[in-house]
Image (spheres, rainbow, N blue to C red):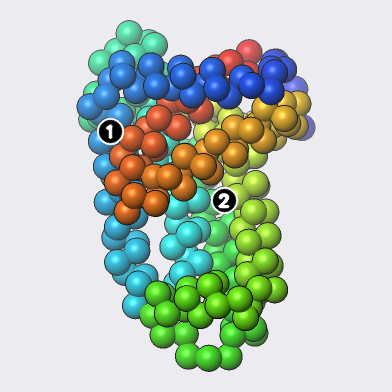
Amino acid sequence: MTTAAREITIKKVGLLRPFHWLRSGWQELMAHPGPSLMYGILVTLAGWAIVTLAAPHAELFSTVITGFVLVAPLIAAGIYELTRLREAGEKASFINSIKSLNRSKGSIADYGIVLILAGILWERAAAVMFALSYGGDMGDAEHFVKEVFLSGNYWTVVIAWLLSGMVLASFIFSITVIGMPMVIDRNADIVTAMITSVRTVMLNLPAMLLWAFMIVMLTGLGMATALIGLIVVMPLLGHATWCAYKDLVG
């Protein structure tokens, strides 16, 4: 553990504290709805582009899911910057938040590399699992989902895929949920940010498990509306995660 990480004080909170973060996140969203929703629109547009490109190619199915898991923490950096600007008494506009990210570009880029490597590893593992278990013609993504995920004939590979996805999501959640806001707030190096994030999750495991569950449920609702719901869900969760960071890290 780095010296900087050891010196950071982490608070312990109760199980239901995530509901407070969500409420505070909504208040932050209402403080600057225009620029916040711009980030939600970006996520939705990126999602539509990814789905459109991947639809004819069943082998890219897992990459589509991975894309949302990986892109979200990086885009959330801009949402964190909005709140940081407002708290600093500066103009919290969409353009200003993009420009201000330059101060933390090194650590954000490092996070991007870690997330991309994790995504590639999982995508390759998923591709191998499907290739070894499914002997038919993959066809397009819709056919592949119906044949593999809905037919009930490949439940073992589906379970393995889901478990590997949970491992990836848990890893990304653990290193970014506090780490990414910390990079934006303190311009911390990625090692200190990740260590602090994992320490915070482990010290507040019940509350953080509930928070992870709430993120999954709200994101699922956003995706179930043809991604349109993500226009609101993404900035809401981003602002709420910033509130969680401020609540937990001294």
- The answer to whether residue 98 shows anywhere in this view is no
Q: Which residue is drawn at 54% across and 26% down?
A: 182
**Residue 12 sits in quarter:** top right
Query: Which quarter of the rendered picture does the N terminus lie within?
Result: top right
Residue 155, x across and y down, in percent: 66, 73
Instruction: Give, as a three-letter code, the residue at label 1.
Output: Leu
The kind of secondary structure element at disc 1 is helix
**SS class, disc 2:** helix
Pick the quarter of the image with the C terminus.
Answer: top right
Give the label on residue 68, or none: none
The residue lying furthest to the top in this view is 89
* Farthest-out residue, bottom: 136
Image coordinates for residue 144, horizontal then vertical, percent = 47, 78
The amino acid beneath tag 2 is: Val
Q: Is residue 204 above or below residue 48?
A: above
- Left or right for 114, reference 72: right
* Cβ atoms under marks 1 and 2 closer than 8 Å: no
Foreground of the two, 39 or 104: 39
* Residue in the image at 45% along x and 57% along y: 67
- Which residue is label 2 attached to? 114
Residue in the foreground of this view, choosing between 180 and 149 = 149
Residue 35 at x, y percent in the picture: 25, 28
Name the foreground residue: 223 vs 122: 223
Badge 1 is on which residue?
37
- Tell me which label, 1 or 2, sits earlier in the chain: 1
Q: Kindly report the distance in space between the C-alpha atoms of the residues bearing marks 1 and 2.
A: 27 Å
Q: Residues within 10 Å of mark 1 (few under 14, many from 20)?
A: many
Number of labels in the image equals: 2
Residue 24: percent from left, percent from top = 46, 17
